[in-house]
Amino acid sequence: MRLTDTSDLWWKTAIFYNLDVKTFLDWNDDGIGDFQGVAHRLDHLAELGVTCLWLAPFYTSPRRDNGYDISDYYGVDSRYGHFGDFIELVRTAKDRGMRVIVDLVVNHTSDQHPWFQAARNDRTSRFREFYQWRDDEPAEQPQNLFPDVEDGVWFWDDVAGQYYRHTFYRHQPDLATDTQVVRDEIAKVIGFWLQLGIDGFRVDAVPYLIDTEDGAEHEYLRAIRRFVSRRNGTGVLLGEVNLPYDEQLKFFGDADGDELTMQFDFVANQRLYLALARGDAAPLTEALLARPALARGNQWGNFVRNHDELTLDQLSESERAEVFEAFAPEEGQRIHGRGIVRRLPPMLDGDPRHIRMVYSLLFSLPGSPVLYYGEEIGMGEEPSITRSRAAVRTAMQWSPDANGGFSNAAAEALVPVVVSGGNSPEHVNVSQQRHDPTSLLSFIKRLTTAYRGAPEIGWGTFAVLDQPHTSVLAHSIESELGLFVAAHNFAPDGRSFTLAIDGAGDDWLVVDMLSDDPAPRPLADAQLSVDLGGYGYQWWRVVRPGEKRLL
Ligand code: NOJ
Ligand code: CA
């Protein structure tokens, strides 16, 4: 088998990029991003090396949860354009060689959804069974996912004369996903978007969507996967499952791998921040060693930040306190008692070496990287927006001009734009970084190019390499394409050491993958000697003589 023969498993080596149409580019200057705006910036994403766009919810919605409160699964928010604009966007992305996935949010609907309106208004409506009801409030309730906003998960509805269940905000009633009628509707929604040429879904809130206790939930997830595969043989299901590894493994379908195709690695993400806070790679190294082996068709989605708070709920209380102290010393930078509403660069005090080390790591870890828009230029959060995820959902910064080149609308009409501090558009923007070979944007392009040229990162077998420094993570990924090696230093001062490359012959060569001089040099005595500066990083490929690799 050659790795290049496996393009049907495209997500094994994809570079995902998540954006919200609302905040990317406002083409008609009404203050809100739109489909045409995104379409006009697809070349930026193609140049960046993105291979799959993940569009945040753009469906018809009252937008009380940034679009994760859907009132029509078959409609697009008219503020973004009409359906034709959406289709043009998808077609243009494909023309640039990018796939497109969309959010599947079927744990709940908006309370404005006609299903819920019909259900609450009439006990005998056929839509009543679409939701979950009860006459009394149970004494013991599961915790609401937004515990600082909602008391529990049962809310009294005067109109309905009953309590309904809501895992998230009270305006997001949970669908009764254990009923066949709701499952049939969900299948129609999935089928609809696949028919429009979508390449799969980011599946929202999977553990809550499928929350029966008897294992039946996994049967349902397998059924969804089979349905997606019948409609689009290479469709991906990238699930949001923020749980310990052993539970994540079940949502992959264990060794069969026949449930979710991909999952975000929330464990490694949280341990990454603990490692950064301590200047010690060990917390991350331990997580990576504890990662369960996946079936061939499954993959991890690695990420640094996303549109939500940086959740630290899988750390212990004292570990979480350490990360809070290091990266969110002010109360306003925290939310829900568990997370941080900041982006990476300000958390690292804008230190370019430190920031680059983190992104180098992201692209070097086994799995597929998922970028959040603006990360490629080092966007920060808006510090005046406190205790809210809105702080990390500001307008994309295209130029040093007014509103960062996002829109010419007047300030009152605009989505939030970063205005304060050193991360405002005059300091951080695409146009200044595009032509600067020393910029973060140029660096990220170098990483995407290197990642795309090294499919073994997505396919190979991971190992941690022995070396004496706990501040360093040195790892290898082995495949039939040769050996990939990387080292990352979490400490501010330099570290030197030697890595033993087991089994390497005298005539083997080593190539420095991120340097300007990729000329292969001999690997002496199967030893790689490494000099990392403070927050240093390096990637190598160890090659046998005569190997057909593009260096
Ligand atoms: C997960 C999404 O990522 C988050 O933004 C949203 O608030 C919840 N699901 C509820 O829909
Ligand atoms: Ca607009």
Image (spheres, helix red, strand yellow):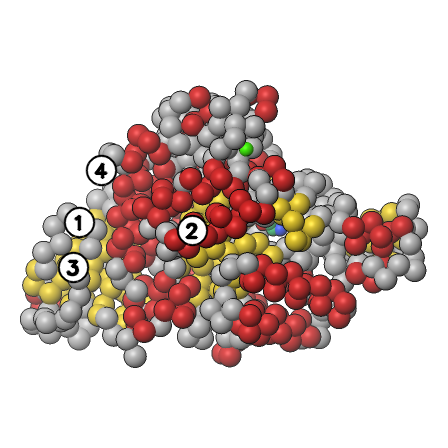
Q: Nearer the viewer, mark 4 or mark 1?
A: 4
Q: Residue at x 62, y 46 (%)?
A: 76
Q: Residue at x 49, y 23 (%)?
A: 408
Q: Earlier in the sequence, mark 1 or mark 3?
A: 1
Q: Earlier in the sequence, mark 4 or mark 3?
A: 4
Q: Using the rendered image of the protein, determine whether residue 262 is visible from the camera's viewpoint.
A: yes
**Residue 515 badge:** 1
Q: Earlier in the sequence, mark 2 or mark 3?
A: 2
Q: Earlier in the sequence, mark 2 or mark 1?
A: 2
Q: Secondary structure at mark 4?
A: loop
How much space separates mark 4 and mark 1, taking CA atoms?
A: 13 Å
The quarter in which the N terminus is drawn is bottom left
The residue singled out by tag 3 in the image is 551
Closer to the camera in the image, 174 or 19: 19
Query: What amino acid type is highlighted by mark number 2?
Result: Ala
Classify residue 447 as left or right of residue 118: left
Q: Earlier in the sequence, mark 4 or mark 1?
A: 4
Q: Nearer the viewer, mark 1 or mark 3?
A: 3
Q: Residues within 10 Å of mark 3 (few under 14, many from 20)?
A: few
Answer with the quarter of the image where residue 415 lies.
top right
How much space separates mark 2 and mark 3, taking CA atoms?
A: 29 Å
The residue singled out by tag 2 in the image is 93
Q: Secondary structure at mark 3?
A: loop
Query: What amino acid type is highlighted by mark number 4?
Result: Pro
Q: Nearer the viewer, mark 2 or mark 4?
A: 2
* Residue 91 pos. (x, y %): 46, 52
